[in-house]
Amino acid sequence: MAYDSLFQPYVLGDLTLKNRIVMAPLTRNRATHGTAAPNDLNAEYYRQRAGAGLIVAEATQISQQGQGYAWTPGIYTSEQVDGWRKVTKAMHAAGGHIYLQLWHVGRISHTSLQPNGGAPVAPSAIQAKVKTFIETGFADVSAPRALESEEIPGIVRNYLNAAENAERAGFDGVELHAANGYLLDQFLRNGANKRHDAYGGSIDNRTRLTIEVLLTLCRVFPKERVGIRLSPVSNLNDLEDSDPQPLFDHLVRELDALKIGYMHVIEGETQGPRDATAFDFARLRKAFKGTYIANNGYDGAMAADAISTGKADLVAFGRAFIANPDLPERLRQSAPLARDNKETWYGGGAEGYTSYPAMTS
Ligand code: 8OZ
């Protein structure tokens, strides 16, 4: 058996994971058009991947305002809850565990996706220089408006509602998406947050919204069933911070005090180089007594090394799960990995989604 350390069970709070392999959240834009509800095809896709110790289901908007791309799923209507229940049932029947990633895109959106065609919301009215894709193709993100201080409790309530819905839909836990340049990351990092109220300026203020949301999620799920995803030095979605180390050192001290279950860290540029910016990820790991999930460009050997040397408790694989539904088994047997087709990453149907076969052994 290859990479032995990856196949030791792991106790995450009160769940026993069968291995150290996490399926990272992957945006695939295949929810039901019109309702943003998951469907039978989505349930089949996740069921095929139930060999992972833990699946973090794709980023899912907590409100229509939180949507930034065509055909991503939501968790704010009863139809969406019913759709997700198909997914969690399939996963549990296959012996897997599944968390939902809760998402608000903030300024990475387009008026055509927003309620009443309004402007996307952000900490400050600064447009990102990136494109999103909408039903008609790629488009520049729309100019955002700054959230009023009085609107922030409403956003926190949307997270609360989403977590309650996730619980109703049968998820084992939730992961808060605070990475990759979306709303919470926009509040954290000073490239997008120029606010003068209690949610901007100092590090304490910029981390406030993320902490408030986590406290709210912990009212719905036991705190050990709540995780967070961070990308301290990723420039994805045109976001950066002038001094990320003290910002994330502070945030992680707060996460440790909250005693949430895990921290899931994209080390380096999202889908890019791991070491483009100097940053001490080991320091984050050391400051947090909960579970550390490492992510970004790991292969089997790197992952096994990270586990056996204690650098990480779990390792999340994203892209490799697209074309290898049975990725853990392939790693265990040192079998070759299939290549994914980028053309079918986002949108479409079964082709390039549930069509990748498991090995025939
Ligand atoms: C790819 C395409 C659209 C969104 C992320 C949720 O980067 C995403 C995402 C990825 O976190």
Image (cartoon, rainbow, N blue to C red):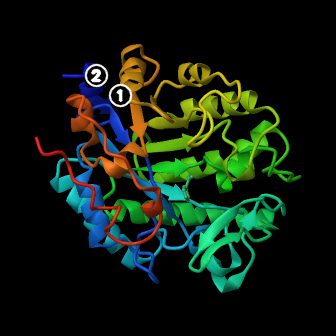
Tell me whether circle 1 and circle 2 mark residues in contact (CB < 8 Å).
yes
66 sits to left or right of 107: left
Q: Which mark is residue 300?
A: 1
Q: Residue furthest left?
A: 361
Image height check: is 224 above or below 170? above
Q: Position of residue 352 (x, y in %)?
A: 35, 61
Q: Position of residue 258 (x, y in %)?
A: 54, 36
Q: Which mark is residue 167?
A: none
Image height check: is 298 above or below 142? above
Q: Position of residue 51 (x, y in %)?
A: 23, 43
37 sits to left or right of 65: left
Q: Secondary structure at mark 1?
A: helix
Quadrant containing the C terminus is top left
Give whichever of 305, 337 is nearer the camera.
337
Q: Is mark 1 within 8 Å of ligand 1?
A: no
> Can I make out residue 85 in this image?
no
> Can I make out residue 158 in this image?
yes
The residue under the point 64% across, 48% down is: 210
Q: Residue furthest bottom?
A: 116
